[in-house]
Image: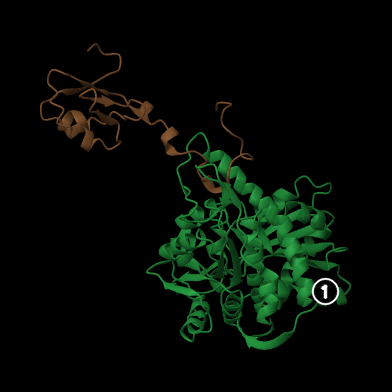
């Protein structure tokens, strides 16, 4: 275990969380990551609403959507639900 | 200062129900099962008569009963339940969750055999099977001790350094259903003795140090997952709670003695005529009462015999046992449960383990007895002492594990 982790004497009993889960990066669980094709994307926001992790953000000032890869678990729901098939699931090292 | 006491005719279950009533318990969630039923029946009468302010929850199963107790306990409530045998087995999952949550729940277990074959009578297979569930376990000898131990149990379990749930085991029928004279304290003395439930402090995700309880003003995440990175650390903390319980049980035993004049050995072990004993029997529960009578008989005949009753099985008082037993030549450990496939009984195994590092290695033999409530008369039990004296004389052990009182 990394030395950043605390010892049993330093933590509250019973697993009471001393940190918010915002700091618990679940993004590293993924195998595939979503890649958006801006040509096909109509910013209908279906993916934003259906992402179970709230990891797709609508940026109205930029007129586009953005993935938060710190929390995206790579489930692929966005790609499956996208009505214009603008999202594809790829391995991180796969060429776009 | 001694408190006022009154003698009442009570069986073990009734004595426990009365103790719970006097301990000002906030929540009782339970499901009836023989031989514990009288406890919850009697307590529900107190509720129906308006004699207590307790919230009484009739659940649909023991699993739910324990879940309700856990849920109540995390709000800061003083909580009690009772079970036995199949009921305790059904609680198994939630026993580990409750101890892992580090909340004090007091549970009376009227010890009963586990099915199959179906048997409602007394042996200790049920709670012995829960020995690794993270619960403190105290076993009593009679109805008086059942009453006293429930009161003590709240104080032990609720101690901030301990913060672990506790089982008070009483032998089914032998104690649970047998009428005895029980000296009962007045409500105020008990109230003063156990006080309000203290709460340990925890640090929340907002960085606040607050009492450990569900409180909308101080939200906290309880029962999260802790994976490879932290699970081990939380389990180690529980062991510290168990270690602290070793001291706390002794301390509460002493404090209680000051109030009532009654004590049970040092709280962990109850030694009888052990100091100069050459042969001794170690047992758990009501059998000790019979054994003490036999020891008196043997002593009158000039035989140096003794008894050690293990009162606290969890935490296991290894050091105290070493001190008490290491100079005795031959010891029998009686287990009223079967650890199937093991080398001798569960208590035998741990006693023998504790004495492995002693200077003198006593000869220790295992006696499995009383399964399914099979009675052991004084005459039967005297034979164990005779076995030990024979081993002492000849230096030869016929069998390491005996099935005592079994038809061969």
Q: Is residue B325 left or right of residue B405?
A: right
Is residue B364 something that shows in the picture? yes
> Residue at the left extreme?
A84
Quadrant of residue B122 in the image?
bottom right
| Chain assignment, label 1 | B
Q: Nearer the viewer, residue B203 or B74?
A: B203
| Residue A56 x/y as whole percent | 27, 30
The part of the image, by quadrant, that contains residue A85 is top left
- What residue is pinned by disc 1? B298
x and y, in percent, of residue B401 in the image: 64, 57
Residue at the (66%, 88%) spot, across then down: B8
Quarter of the image that includes the C terminus of chain B: bottom right
Image height of B300 relative to B196, above or below: below
- A33 vs B379: above or below: above
Residue A38 in the image: x percent, y percent? 17, 19
Report the residue at 61% width, 35% height from top: A7
Disc 1 crowd, CA 10 A, few/some/many (<14, 14-19, 20+): some
Identify the element where label 1 is drawn. Answer: helix
Which chain is green in the picture? B
Q: Is residue B400 visible?
A: no
Colour pattern of the rendering: by chain
In the picture provided, is B115 more to the left or to the right than A50?
right
B100 vs A66, nearest the viewer: A66
Query: Which color has been applied to chain A in this rendered view?
Result: brown
- Position above or below: B111 against B49: above
Q: Is residue B272 above or below residue B349?
A: below
x and y, in percent, of residue B170 in the image? 60, 71
Classify the position of the N terminus of chain B by image quarter.
bottom right
So how many labels did they put on this image? 1
């Amino acid at each position: 275990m990394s030395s950043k982790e605390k010892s049993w004497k330093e933590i509250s009993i019973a697993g009471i969380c001393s940190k918010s889960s915002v700091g618990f990066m679940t993004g590293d669980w993924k195998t595939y990551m979503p890649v958006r094709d801006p040509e096909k994307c109509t910013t209908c926001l279906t993916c934003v609403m259906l992402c179970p992790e709230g990891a797709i953000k609508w940026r109205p000032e930029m007129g586009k959507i953005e993935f938060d890869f710190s929390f995206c678990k790579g489930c692929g729901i966005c790609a499956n639900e996208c009505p214009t098939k603008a999202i594809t699931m790829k391995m991180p090292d796969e060429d776009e | 200062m001694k408190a006022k006491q009154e003698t009442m005719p009570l069986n073990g279950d009734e004595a426990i129900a009365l103790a719970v009533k006097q301990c000002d318990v906030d929540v009782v969630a339970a499901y009836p099962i023989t031989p514990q039923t009288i406890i919850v029946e009697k307590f529900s009468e107190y509720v129906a008569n308006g004699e207590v302010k307790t919230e009484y929850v009739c659940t649909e199963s023991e699993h739910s009963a324990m879940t309700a107790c856990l849920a109540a306990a995390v709000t800061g409530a003083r909580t009690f339940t009772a079970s036995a045998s199949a009921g305790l087995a059904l609680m198994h999952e939630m026993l580990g969750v409750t101890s892992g949550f580090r909340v004090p729940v007091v549970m009376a277990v009227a010890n009963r055999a586990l099915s199959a074959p179906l048997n409602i009578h007394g042996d200790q297979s049920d709670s012995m099977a829960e020995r690794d569930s993270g619960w403190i376990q105290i076993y009593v000898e009679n109805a008086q001790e059942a009453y006293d131990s429930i009161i003590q149990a709240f104080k032990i379990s609720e101690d901030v350094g301990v913060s672990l749930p506790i089982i008070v085991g009483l032998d089914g029928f032998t104690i649970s259903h047998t009428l005895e004279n029980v000296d009962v304290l007045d409500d105020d003395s008990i109230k003063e003795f156990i006080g309000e439930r203290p709460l340990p402090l925890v640090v929340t995700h907002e960085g606040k140090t607050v009492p450990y309880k569900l409180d909308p003003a101080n939200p906290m995440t309880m029962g999260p997952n802790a994976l490879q990175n932290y699970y081990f650390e939380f389990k180690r903390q529980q062991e510290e709670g168990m270690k602290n319980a070793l001291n706390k049980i002794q301390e509460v035993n002493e404090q209680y003695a000051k109030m009532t004049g009654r004590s049970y050995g040092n709280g962990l072990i109850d030694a009888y005529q052990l100091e100069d004993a050459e042969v001794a029997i170690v047992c758990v529960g009501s059998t000790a009462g019979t054994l003490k009578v036999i020891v008196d008989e043997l002593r009158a005949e000039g035989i140096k015999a003794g008894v050690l009753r293990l009162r606290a099985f969890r935490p296991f008082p290894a050091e105290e046992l070493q001190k008490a037993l290491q100079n005795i030549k031959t010891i029998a450990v009686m287990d009223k449960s079967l650890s199937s496939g093991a080398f001798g009984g569960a208590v035998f195994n741990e006693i023998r383990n504790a004495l492995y590092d002693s200077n003198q290695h006593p000869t220790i033999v295992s006696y499995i007895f009383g399964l399914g409530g099979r009675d052991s008369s004084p005459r039967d039990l005297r034979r164990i002492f005779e076995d030990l004296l024979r081993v002492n004389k000849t230096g030869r052990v016929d069998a390491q594990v005996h099935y005592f009182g079994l038809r061969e």
